[in-house]
Image: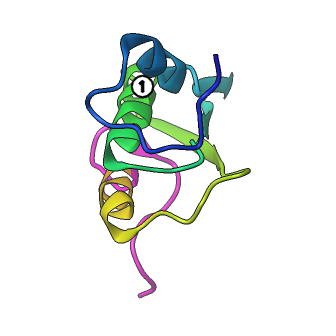
Amino acid sequence: MTIEARPYGPETSPTDRAELRSRVSQLEDRLFILVEVPIQTPFTLDVLFDRLEELTAGMDRFAYVVDLTGVQRPDARAREPHSAASCGNSPQPAASCGGSG
């Protein structure tokens, strides 16, 4: 099964939820990849970042790459949790967050 180009939400089936989780994987020791879905929603971002947190549990530092191939630009509602998740306190990604300054 593949993820369709449609919004996913809390009503998502367990099979689709597992498919979403499988889009996060480890490339190297402390390097991960998130393959974003075509239409981002707060729900899909939660699923992806929850999986990333599971995979990075116990790591003090890590990095991740987001594959945006075929992704539509998210609306403000979908971007908000992504910004918070990518700049969260635990675990800490190796990338810097925030604006210039």
| Mark 1 Cα shell of 10 Å, populated few (<14), some (14-19), many (≥20) | some
Q: Is residue 91 magenta?
A: yes
Where is residue 4 drawn, in percent x and y? 59, 35
Badge 1 element:
helix
- Which quadrant holds residue 77? bottom left
Camera sees residue 28: no
Point out the image quarter for the C terminus. Answer: bottom left
- Tell me how many marks there are: 1
Name the dominant secondary structure of the magenta segment: loop
Describe the colour scheme in one phrase: rainbow
In the picture of the structure, the residue carrying the numbered disc 1 is 51
Point out the image quarter for the N terminus. Answer: top right
Q: Which residues are magenta?
A: 86-101
Q: Is residue 67 above or below residue 32?
A: below
Q: Nearer the viewer, residue 88 or 47?
A: 47
Residue at figure coordinates x 64%, y 24% from the top left: 2
Residue at figure coordinates x 47%, y 50% from the top left: 40
Q: Nearer the viewer, residue 88 or 41?
A: 41
Residue at figure coordinates x 35%, y 70% from the top left: 76
Camera sees residue 94: yes
The kind of residue on which mark 1 rests is Arg
Where is residue 68 drawn, in percent x and y? 66, 52
